[in-house]
Image (spheres, grey):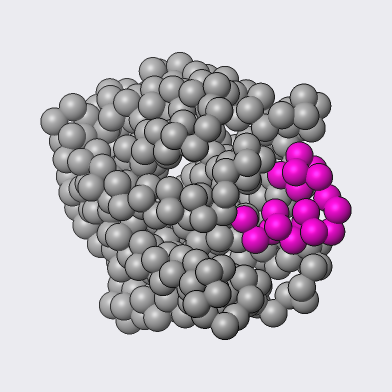
Amino acid sequence: MMYDWANSAYSVIITTAVFPIFYKSVASGAGVSNADSTAYLGYAVAIATFILAMIGPILGSIADYEGLKKKFFFFFFIVGSLSTLSLAFVPDGNWILLLMVYTITAVGFHGANIFYDAFLVDVTSAHRMDNISARGFGLGYIGSAIPFIISIAIILLADSGTLPISMTFATKLAFVITAIWWITFTLPMLKNVIQIHSVPRESSIIVGSFKRLGSTFKDIRKYRHVFLFLIAYFFYIDGVGTIISMSTAYGTDLGISATTLLIVLLMTQIVAAPFAVIYGRLSDKFTGKKMLYVGIVVYIIVCIYAFFMKNELDFWILAMLVATSQGGIQSLSRSYFAKLVPKEKSNEFFGFYNIFGKFASVMGPLLLGVTTQLTGSSSYGVFSLVLLFIVGGVILKFVPEQDVKVV
């Protein structure tokens, strides 16, 4: 759970808040239109997630071998955290290089999460997974709020002239703070968490990994409920991820100030923390599937409301709606899936979990980006995401109400 505390700083500062605002400012200064810069950010997210979608199941299958899960986790963690630090050293005004480095940070961040999520089967029992996963997300929201507050304070003090530094330098300090926070609080994970469930080592782990992947596809009927859930997840998590990664760019297009965006996003983190835990507790009473439906309905309302959003108050209302379900829908998806898969093949299956989620994240930003460019309005791009939640909800209906465990 401490890794949720550690890496959530990246989620809010780099994915959602400070970086998109900074990028939009740099791109605008270079003469790129608002609609185009939003679309290019969507394309960068799509490229990063496409890379992960390609390598996720393969690396996951290899990591199922004894002792390899943490090594893969460490590699992607290092790539993500050091490239995040590198954002501070991109030359001023170079928006293309900024997007390239950002793409690398996204590969590292999401790549590490493949193996981190798969560790869920190693650290708790099946009946506690919903609560542990939800508490991890809740702890992450609290943990991310601390470096976010520090970063906002530095940026606002620089903007007011209280600190004798430029806004650009203040923003780059936020990137440094994010990397240091991420690295520091990952140490407990690296020191204490061990891989319990694994596949015995073979003479050729790469050949063996491909054979096991082939066997999984061959016996796909055996894992019918797993893949049915993944198809539903593919659609609804697409909308969730796109809204998270593109929200500040959308707010900027609507003319909302950077200061307001940062404050709203901070409050979103604070409100989201208890709601993530509430989702976990309610899943014990109403089942995880029903709570996933609650989250899907809330997000449909978000997309519709966003289409008609006109002022700052509307953005506040929208952000609070997202805060009620953002952590819940993600944490319950993770734990629901963890209970479905065979523990000794958790990395392989979380590789599939990643590929479905990341392919969805390719489609979502592309859908938003293309719709925005065709219509010249970000509102139509966000509204188009409603379709993804509806399709995901319909497919989820065919996943068993009770958790089906594959032995």
Prevailing secondary structure of the magenta residues? helix
> Residue at horizontal 65%, vertical 72%?
168
Can you name the residue that lies furthest to the right here? 31
Can you name the residue that lies furthest to the left here? 285
Q: Quadrant of the N terminus?
A: bottom left
> Residue at horizontal 78%, vertical 54%?
28
Image quadrant assignment for residue 22? bottom right
Which region of the structure is painted magenta?
A: 21-38
Q: Which percent across, then down, holds residue 256? A: 57, 43
Image quadrant assignment for residue 51? bottom right
Q: Nearer the viewer, residue 86 or 173?
A: 173
Q: Which percent across, then down, holds residue 142? A: 30, 60
Image quadrant assignment for residue 332? top left
Q: Quadrant of the C terminus?
A: top left
Q: Which percent across, then down, holds residue 209? A: 57, 58
> Residue at horizontal 53%, vertical 27%?
309
- Residue 337 lies, with reference to residue 181, above or below; the image says above
Is 157 colored magenta in this rendering? no
> Residue at horizontal 81%, vertical 45%?
33
